[in-house]
Amino acid sequence: MLIIDRTLLDLGNLRPGAEVNVTVREEGTSTIEPIRNTVDPEVARSVARKFVQSNDELFRRVSQ
């Protein structure tokens, strides 16, 4: 657990409970970066498939 005061949370655009990546370098400096959510590949594939299906006619006309 890492405790960060309110000022640093605000400056880092973080909220309580946010997941972060902490990098500690040999010289003693540390970097704290928020872990950004990414889209699950299967969810992205499903959404893309639905988008293509719902715009099938448009894609067919554009590709000719």
Image: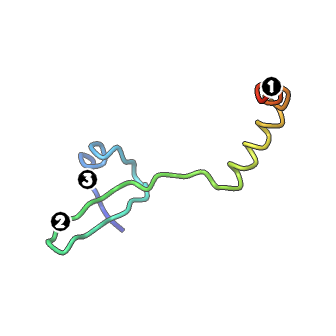
Q: Looking at the image, tell me whether mark 3 or mark 1 is earlier in sequence order.
A: 3
> Which residue is disc 2 drawn over?
29
Q: Is residue 52 left or right of residue 32?
A: right
Q: Residue 47, located in which quarter of the rendered image?
A: top right
Q: Is residue 45 left or right of residue 1?
A: right
Q: Nearer the viewer, mark 2 or mark 3?
A: 2
Q: Nearer the viewer, mark 1 or mark 2?
A: 1
Q: Which dot marks residue 5?
A: 3
**Quarter of the figure that contains the C terminus:** top right
The percent coordinates of residue 18 (x first, y second) are: 43, 54
Q: Is residue 42 left or right of residue 2?
A: right
The percent coordinates of residue 16 (x first, y second) are: 40, 52
Q: Residues within 10 Å of mark 3 (few under 14, many from 20)?
A: few
Q: Residue 2, located in which quarter of the rendered image?
A: bottom left
Residue 59 vertical placement versus 25 (above, below): above
As measured in the structure, the alpha-carbon distance from the residue carrying label 2 to the one carrying label 3 is 18 Å
Q: Is residue 46 left or right of residue 11?
A: right
Q: Nearer the viewer, mark 3 or mark 1?
A: 1
Q: Which dot marks residue 58?
A: 1
Q: Residues within 10 Å of mark 2 (few under 14, many from 20)?
A: few
The percent coordinates of residue 32 (x first, y second) are: 30, 59
Residue ranking furthest to the bottom: 26
The residue shown at (76%, 36%) is 51
The residue shown at (26%, 43%) is 11
Residue 48 vertical placement versus 30 (above, below): above
